[in-house]
Image (cartoon, rainbow, N blue to C red):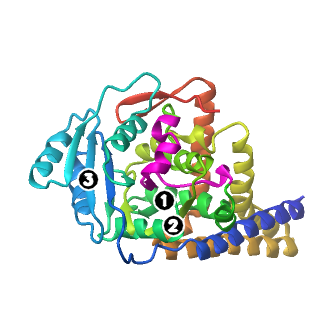
């Protein structure tokens, strides 16, 4: 039994390590932009972001090499967000403040805010940016330039994730474990299949024409996972999408408390991993490839099974080598590498909790709003 489990763990660890190696080779930052570029609308949805919005505007307005406008939609904030944006708009004509309309029945807050921003934008490239994202001065130009060079309709990337607390270091990097470990990026680039579409809602550039052809955010008004749904809908409409390494383009601190991490990862879990069909597969891949080799190594050492111990040690080494390579490229904490198996277990716990809550008709709370967890 130990040998069989050891071989399973080794196979799954090798799959992860091989996929990470291939994806890191394929996932490169966009090069420096050259020549004339289409103008970009930077679109920022904001709800109670008084602590964030000033720095977000600083980064947006510092863009170089491309014509921009910055449109912020205040979505019912009660903390002075709108007043901060209004003051900046009065000082810089590139900034516009929108006051969000009442949210229709069946819509999700951020989805509705982004839909309004998309309708108000004036430029041919829409760059959706979360309020907690800090753009490098060449971010918009490099994204627009890559879209022009590669003939892309949608280009997205994960900003460098800033992790201050232990909880952040353990959990946040697991986003990249699933992305780089299990999305075959070279295959996704060759195939127009919508299921290969992927992106990050924190930083998403899309051509206006492609956005409209795909139905924009209105096409998934009651769902949250715009990072997946926009690229997939653009592909369904015949457009081309891609992922890029946005580490040098932007930074983001998603959550800074354990509670926010749990709620943040839970809010759209049932639109991704936490479904009755998907979660058993993800459990096999993540637990089997990242945790099982450690368990079989310990069991083999206790049982005095040197062959099993050697194979398990190889599996553990493959996983940690892949995580170390990710940490170097994505500038992650080395503590996150050391505690990687714990991070996998926490993510699985969040997914199972979200699935159970959805089956019971539970609600998820985010930004003062409650949403049902009815994901299939």
Mark sitting earlier along the chain (1/3): 3
Tally the numbered discs: 3
> For the point 53% across and 43% down, which residue is it?
214
Label 1: element kind: strand
Label 2: element kind: strand
Report how far apart the C-alphas of labels 1 and 3 lie in the structure. Answer: 18 Å
Q: Quadrant of the C terminus?
A: top right
Instruction: Residue under label 2, please give it.
Output: 244
Instruction: Judge whether residue 320 can be spotted in this image.
Output: no
Residue 314 in the image: x percent, y percent? Answer: 75, 75
Q: Quadrant of the N terminus?
A: bottom right
> Would you say the residues marked 2 and 1 are in contact, meaning their CB atoms lie under 8 Å apart?
yes
Judged left or right of residue 244, residue 181 is right
Q: Nearer the viewer, residue 176 or 193?
A: 193
Q: Nearer the viewer, residue 222 or 356?
A: 222
Instruction: Residue under label 3, please give it.
Output: 70
Q: Nearer the viewer, residue 121 or 15?
A: 121
> Would you say the residues marked 1 and 3 are in contact, meaning their CB atoms lie under 8 Å apart?
no
Residue 235 in the image: x percent, y percent? Answer: 60, 51
Report how far apart the C-alphas of labels 2 and 3 lie in the structure. Answer: 22 Å
Instruction: Give, as a single range, the part of the protein colored magenta.
Output: 193-219
Query: Is residue 194 highlighted in magenta?
Result: yes
Q: Residues within 10 Å of mark 3 (few under 14, many from 20)?
A: many
> For the point 89% across and 61% down, which residue is it?
4
Q: Is residue 178 above or below residue 324?
A: above
Res 156 label: 1
Label 3: element kind: strand
Judged left or right of residue 67, residue 243 is right
């Amino acid at each position: 039994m130990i040998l069989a489990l050891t071989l399973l763990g080794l196979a799954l660890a090798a799959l992860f390590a091989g996929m990470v190696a291939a994806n890191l080779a394929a996932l490169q930052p966009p090069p420096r932009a050259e020549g004339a570029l289409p103008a970009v609308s930077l679109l920022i949805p904001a709800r109670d972001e008084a602590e964030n919005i000033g720095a977000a505007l600083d980064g947006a307005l510092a863009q170089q090499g491309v014509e921009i406008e910055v449109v912020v939609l205040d979505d019912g904030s009660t903390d002075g967000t709108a007043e901060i944006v209004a003051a900046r708009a009065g000082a810089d004509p590139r900034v516009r403040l929108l006051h969000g309309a009442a949210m229709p029945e069946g819509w999700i807050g951020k989805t509705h805010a982004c839909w309004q921003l998309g309708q108000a934008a004036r430029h041919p490239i829409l760059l959706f940016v979360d309020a907690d994202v800090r753009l490098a001065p060449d971010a918009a130009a490099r994204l627009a330039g890559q879209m022009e060079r590669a003939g892309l309709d949608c280009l997205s990337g994960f900003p460098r994730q800033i992790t201050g607390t232990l909880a952040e270091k353990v959990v946040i990097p697991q986003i990249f474990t699933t992305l780089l470990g299990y999305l075959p990026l070279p295959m996704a680039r060759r195939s127009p299949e919508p299921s290969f579409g992927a992106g990050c809602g924190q930083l998403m550039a899309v051509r206006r024409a492609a956005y409209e052809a795909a139905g924009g955010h209105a096409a998934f008004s009651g769902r949250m996972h715009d990072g997946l749904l926009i690229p997939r809908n653009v592909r369904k409409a015949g457009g081309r999408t891609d992922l890029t390494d946005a580490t040098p383009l932007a930074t983001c601190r998603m959550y800074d408390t354990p509670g926010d991490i749990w709620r943040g990862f839970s809010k759209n879990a049932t639109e991704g991993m936490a479904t009755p069909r998907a979660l058993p597969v993800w459990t096999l891949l993540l637990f089997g490839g990242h945790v099982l080799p450690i368990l079989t190594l310990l069991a083999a050492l206790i049982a005095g099974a040197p062959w099993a111990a050697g194979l398990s040690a190889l599996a553990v080494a493959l996983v940690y080598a892949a995580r170390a390579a990710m940490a170097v490229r994505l500038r992650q904490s080395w503590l996150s590498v050391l505690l990687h198996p714990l991070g996998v277990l926490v993510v699985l716990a969040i997914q199972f909790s979200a699935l159970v809550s959805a089956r019971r008709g539970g609600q998820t709370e985010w930004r003062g709003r409650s949403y049902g967890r009815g994901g299939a």
